[in-house]
Image (tube, helix red, strand yellow):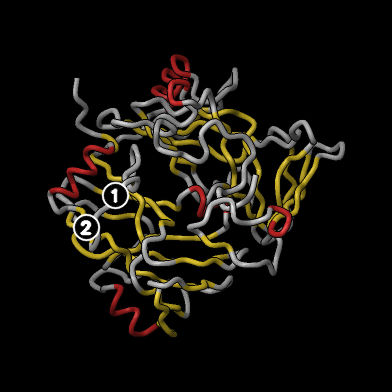
Amino acid sequence: MTRETGILADAAIQALSENQQIITEHPFDGDQIQPASLDLRLGKKAYRVRASFLPGKGRTVSDKLKRFKLHELNLEDGAILETGCVYLVPLLESLDLPGDIEASANPKSSTGRLDIFTRVITDESQAFDQIPAGYSGPLYLEISPSTFPVVVRTGSRLSQIRFRKGHSILTDDELMALHKSEILVATSEPNIHNNGIGLSIDLSGDDNCLIGYRGKRHTGLVDVDKKAACEVLDYWEPIYNRGSDDLVLDPNEFYILVSQEAVHVPPLYAAEMVPFDPLVGEFRVHYAGFFDPGFGHASAGGKGARGVLEVRSHEVPFILEHGQLVGRLVYEHMLERPAQLYGTDLGSNYQAQGLKLSKHFKS
């Protein structure tokens, strides 16, 4: 039976492009369409702005830019984005969506692991990363590097967009049934509530007692388009379990940690990590929340893959303990099975992962 609601897969995203419902100044890169999302590319200019903003109903982003921009940068030959600053970049992609297709955006995994805060905004938007059904107009990306200064250029891909038809989120009962048949998280007693399935933190450490990394301040540049170019210890402080299964999160410091459970996203589903849940603590987990179909799937080379967590505490120190619930995964139906799954011939960087930094750092 064909579903009538769900997340659009790769073939349907390609069809949106062919029908001029995704409009781009340049043809798609060969690997730009993912199993359940499309990578978005930076355009030719970046604008340093005084502060983050939303245009609001009846107003365009370009109108707000005239008021709030400080200066502009040419991205065609590359430019440095400094920490603590807010930039706005028109994207190469724009939209002319049909009336029954909406979209949402999220940072790419590598973006989140660099502590680059990104949010997509549209004309008349009153919320970040949300594109209403039938939207026709440009897309902009707000970028704010928090830990490392970064080099970006025209065509750099920091964010991704998912297209959705109708309501597609699984209920608690549907999640439990799917978990029993497919094992969504590797635990005997899944924490399922509020249409999500819980993930807990692993602070026991690997064979070397390594539990995570804390980002260093005042580092060199990270080029977002270069893989394995940076030395780990120049940018990160390793954190080890020294006999206590807890970790004090310092306010406004950035951590890379890992979930205790391995995660599995079956081919007919997509998942998203809820980035912040005040019910479990005053900290943010997982800037980059999209999990594509096939993540951790055995036939796609996964056999379960743990969720790497980008963690930042808010305002006050916070103690994390091993096994503590830190977030939850929301699963959605796909409209159809993708032609390619995450990890299958896609050069996916994080399939079958454990604790892992972004692709920019030498292994």
Q: Residue furthest top?
A: 181
Residue 36 in sight in this render: yes
Question: Residue at left 47%, top 33%?
Answer: 196
Place of residue 97 in the rendered image (x, y in percent of width and height, measured from the top left): 18, 52
Q: Is residue 70 above or below residue 80?
A: below
Q: Secondary structure at mark 1?
A: strand
Amino acid type, callout 1: Ala
Amino acid type, callout 2: Leu
Pointers 1 and 2 in contact (C-beta within 8 Å)? yes
Determine which quarter of the picture holds residue 76. bottom left
Q: Is residue 209 above or below residue 299?
A: below
How far apart marks 1 and 2 lie (CA) works out to 10 Å
Left or right of 273? Residue 218 is right
Q: Secondary structure at mark 2?
A: strand
Determine which quarter of the picture holds residue 100. top left
Look at mark 1 in the image and give the residue it sits on.
103
Question: Residue at left 69%, top 52%?
Answer: 232
Look at mark 2 in the image and give the residue it sits on.
95
